[in-house]
Amino acid sequence: MNLNEQAAQRKALVARLNAAKREDRFSALKELIAFENANGLDPVKRENDSNNHIHTIYSFSPYSPTAAAYMAYTAGLTSCGIMDHDSLSGAEEFTQACKFLGMGYTCGVEVRAKFNRRHWGKINHPDQEDCVYMAAHGVPAQNVAAFNAYLEKYRARRVERDRKMTELINGKFGKFGFNIDFEKDVYDASQAAEGGSITERHLMNALAKKLEERFGRTEALIEFLTRDLELGVGEKQRAFLTDSENPHFNYDLLGVLKADTKFFYIDAEDEMPDVVEFVNTAVSFGAIPAYAYLGDVGDSVTGDKRAQKFEDDFLDELIDEVRSVGIRAVAYMPTRNTEAQLDRLRALCAAKGLFEISGEDINSPRQKFECKALANPRYANLIDSTWALIGHERACEKGVENGMFAAKAEGEYPDLQDRIQAFAKIGRASVEK
């Protein structure tokens, strides 16, 4: 087999990781790894790297849980974590794939929660005040189904709001001859029927498909975006959107469209749990609730956020409130923030005894699974934190009373850093051959 034939066969197997049925996806993974092993295509391992915030098709992403695990593996990561919006429906599949790949794994869920403890306005949510994005990390396997059942009512309420937002999109685009059928273009294109969530990105994706059907990948599309919609299209984006061979066209167009969501965005209300309720529920299932730090955005490192103020002006007071409602961790993305922002945040975490968790938000095919910032020795603690998170999850599989923040562990290791090292040892041991 020559190199071109080898590449074609591998590409076909990778595509099958996103097959419609879970069992077909796993079968493709086994074939793919056997093929790679036979052809000396094993990845170079990146021991000092991790990613605990990978979205899948069960929220919005180009990757099935199996494909997500494989992409992390082929990027050289030795551990990875699933993190879908309002859903744990992909956790079992993700776990199965990671076990097969010999990787450390952790399962979590991301939600928006009501946080009207004080009126700060926007906290870490770009579109809505008095609410926060937060995560529940390290959900032990035996509690995934029950936790997911708890989230079901919030997913259902989210669908009703999605319907209303679709109507607003149609109200604006109807004059141009566009109409999104929510059931056909949004619901059926998601994993909602299998317990996935529908996000605002699903709505933008449906609109992007309509625009491609009308204009194709042409200058006429660029003209419509800039003249009729008054959206900015940079030279790099123009090149992507007029490239007939671009495999990521829909995601690139979605990226342009999501710059203007105000005309259809409806504040979430019933689909959000109160922060205290969610924290207590997560803890009861053995998870670690974590506040997701965003930080003021200036010149966005990742290029996907406009300049905007978030929580930095009141971060000290916010961290006190976060701690007071029972949140024991802060999650952040090292590539998104400046060193000065992260130094301040990390100092607050140390002062308040908050566990630091890292992860790069993966929901687009142009994003890299690795986190290059973790190569910086100043963030070496985040690798230990990842393995401690994995260790927490494995320990909780024997009972949630064995978790990192349960009384038993706090009594044995009152110093958080000592506890992190102890649980990191459990995590690393869980994947040792």
Image (tube, rainbow, N blue to C red):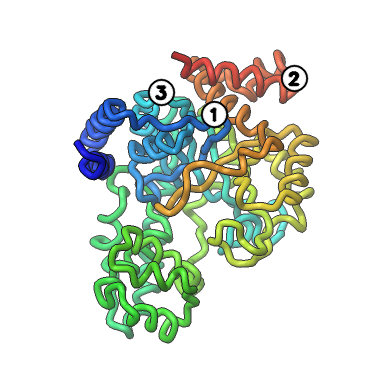
- With 46 as the anchor, is 384 left or right in this view? right
Q: Does label 2 or label 3 sit earlier along the sequence?
A: 3
- Give how far apart the Cα atoms at labels 2 and 3 are: 32 Å
Give above or below for 180 relative to 392: below
Residue 326, visible in the rendered structure = no
- With 313 as the anchor, is 298 left or right in this view? left
Residue 39: percent from the left, percent from the top?
28, 30
Q: Which secondary structure, mark 1?
A: loop
Neighbour class for label 3 at 10 Å: few (<14), some, many (≥20)? some
- Give how far apart the Cα atoms at labels 1 and 2 are: 28 Å
Which residue position is annotated with label 1? Answer: 47
Which residue position is annotated with label 2? Answer: 414
Which amino acid is tagged 2?
Pro
- Viewer-nearest of labels 1 and 3? 1
Q: Residue at x 69, y 43 (%)?
A: 322
Give above or below for 272 relative to 49: below
Q: Does label 1 or label 2 sit earlier along the sequence?
A: 1
**Position of the N terminus by quadrant:** top left
**Position of the C terminus by quadrant:** top left
Residue 407: percent from the left, percent from the top?
67, 19
Please give the label number shown on residue 102.
3
Which amino acid is tagged 3?
Gly
Please identify the quarter of the rendering in which residue 298 is found.
bottom right
